[in-house]
Image (cartoon, rainbow, N blue to C red):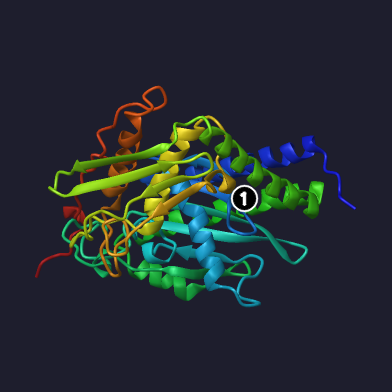
Amino acid sequence: MTKHYDPITLEIIQNSLQAAADEMFAAMRRTAMSAIIYEVLDTGTGITDRYGELAGSGAGIPAFVGVLDKTVKQNMAKFDKPGDIEPGDVFITNDPYNGGVTHLNDMVLTMPVFADGEIVARTANIAHWNDVGGMVPGSMSTEAVEIFQEGMIYPGVKLISRGQPIQGVFDILTANCRMPDFLTGDLWAGVASVRVGERRVLEIVNKYGKDVFLHAVEQYMDYGERVSLNALKELPNGIYTLAEEQDSGQVYKVMVEIKDDEFIVDLRDNPDQDPGPFNMSADDAIVAAQIAFKNVTSPDRIANGGTFRPLKVLLRHGSVFNPKYPAAMGIYCEISIRLHDLIMRCLAQHMPERLPAGSFASICGTLFGGIHPDQAAPTL
């Protein structure tokens, strides 16, 4: 017998997930110690379903929100044995090759949400930490040639077990940071954020029941896919290409194929990976394509795991958009924003009513760091 689910209740649950993710963002902003989080808002929050698909996203940088489901899925693949993941656990990841997606400064915290002994969702956030070790203060060297020079790597590590901090992991984190007080403050802000999300999800589950909650999330994913598929039918089918020279002299190329039911971004014909830190991970290339896809299809509608089911991204291992380990990625953001702009520019000339011209395609960041004279060690 097929169960009947009240559509009003399902929509309330879906909107409640969005509100919970927004509250996670507010908690992060109000409790973080670093200005880059509470003022610049270099952070993002979200809630995934039990399979790791994005179900609700908070405010923050869109590219950061797009990271979270990929980190959750990496943790699910790594901790897949009974007892690996328990109620109250929190995991930390910053490795671009293992779910960290961006660069080592961007720390992702994830937390499972258990109801009746079963994982029903996961909460997650990401934020830029000031320093995670490496060869320069701030950990973002333009001269790094391998990721080991950019800081300590945490490829999905349990930070809190059954609600209790694992002191050894905390000690490793602070021992490899030039600003341990700021690191500790931002870390606990992240923990507070995922715990807020856990509490709100459990309130929803307890109010409406686990089965209703899981069904609502599943329906929400399917709805996201339908929105994208309907939007694709309004786009002109075809194959579109663009090649554009970069400041380095390299030529970035993109080919986009639009079908009624599929949106393919082909990035295989691109330069080999950069010998320095100007690379981006495969997951981050997918995030850039997801943002462009959303802009083209349904920018004013929902964005969840189902939204991106029609999107397919093709990459070549060893390229600047999918480098081989242990390539450096400290300045990934410049490559990421250029890739997004490349896709947008490729399509804008064919659908000018939907897209603007390309942007400046740079975050215009200035990196400097050192030890304040007042804090310098005395000379003998």
Q: 242 and 127: which one is in front?
A: 242
Residue at 62 percent of width and 66 percent of height: 163
In the figure, residue 274 lies in which quadrant? bottom left
Q: Where is residue 228 in the image (x, y as percent from the top left)?
A: 55, 38
Q: Is residue 281 left or right of residue 311?
A: left
Residue 38 in sight from this viewpoint: no
- Residue 114 versus residue 298 in the image, above or below: below
Q: 35 and 232: which one is in front?
A: 232
- Residue 255 versus residue 302 in the image, above or below: below
Residue 377 in sight from this viewpoint: yes
Name, please, the residue furthest toward the right.
Answer: 1
Q: How many marks?
A: 1
Q: Is residue 147 left or right of residue 174?
A: left
Name, please, the residue furthest toward the top.
Answer: 353
Residue at 44 percent of width and 35 percent of height: 237
Label 1 crowd bin: few (<14), some (14–19), many (20+), radius 10 Å: many
Image quarter in which the C terminus is found: bottom left
Q: Name the residue under label 1.
A: 197
- Residue 49 versus residue 152 in the image, above or below: above
Q: Position of residue 6 (x, y in %)?
A: 82, 39
Q: Where is residue 203 in the image (x, y as percent from the top left)?
A: 74, 49
Q: 176 and 141: which one is in front?
A: 141
In the figure, residue 244 lies in which quadrant? top left
Q: Where is residue 86 in the image (x, y as percent from the top left)?
A: 65, 70
Q: 306 and 38: which one is in front?
A: 306
Q: Is residue 114 left or right of residue 230?
A: right
Residue at 16 percent of width and 50 percent of height: 250
Amino acid type at mark 1: Gly
Name, please, the residue furthest toward the left.
Answer: 380
Q: Is mark 1 on a helix, strand or loop?
A: helix
